[in-house]
Image (tube, grey):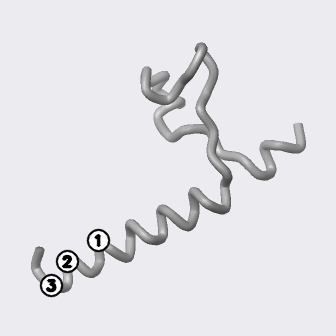
Amino acid sequence: GWWWDHFTEHPGYVNKEETSMISSKAKVTCTVIFGQHVAQEQQLDQEHISTGQ
């Protein structure tokens, strides 16, 4: 359906991780917000690498 244009399944759902599901269905997140969180974590990782943390 149209909603898959806007939502992404939990990354662990591919492997059927228990934490990726609720009531045997995949947890989902807004694709835009998920992308923002990933970008933020990547930036923090780069900052930690550059400061030797």
Query: As drawn, which residue projects farthest toward the right?
Result: 2
How far apart are the two marked residues, 1 and 3, measured between alpha carbons?
10 Å
Which residue bears the numbered disc 3?
51
Task: Check contact, mark 1 vs mark 2: CB within 8 A.
Answer: yes
Neighbourhood count class around disc 3 (C-alpha, 10 Å): few under 14, some 14–19, many 20 upward: few
Position above or below: 51 against 14? below
- Seen in the image, is 3 located left or right of residue 42? right
Q: Which residue is drawn at 57% across and 57% down?
A: 34
- Comes first in the chain, label 1 or label 3: 1
Q: Residue at x 55, y 67 (%)?
A: 36
Element assignment for label 3: loop
Amino acid at pointer 2 = Ile
Position above or below: 27 against 34? above
Element assignment for label 2: helix
Amino acid at pointer 3 = Thr
Residue 37 coordinates in the image, percent (x, y): 49, 63
Which residue bears the numbered disc 1?
45
Q: Which residue is drawn at 88% across and 37% down?
A: 1
Neighbourhood count class around disc 2 (C-alpha, 10 Å): few under 14, some 14–19, many 20 upward: few
Query: As drawn, which residue projects farthest toward the top?
Result: 23
Residue 26 location, quadrant:
top right
Residue 23 coordinates in the image, percent (x, y): 60, 14
Residue 9 location, quadrant:
top right
Which residue bears the numbered disc 2?
49
Task: Check contact, mark 2 vs mark 3: CB within 8 A.
Answer: yes
Residue 8 coordinates in the image, percent (x, y): 65, 45
- Seen in the image, is 7 located left or right of residue 1? left
How far apart are the two marked residues, 2 and 3, measured between alpha carbons?
5 Å
Split into 4 quadrants, where in the image is the C terminus?
bottom left
Element assignment for label 1: helix
Neighbourhood count class around disc 1 (C-alpha, 10 Å): few under 14, some 14–19, many 20 upward: few
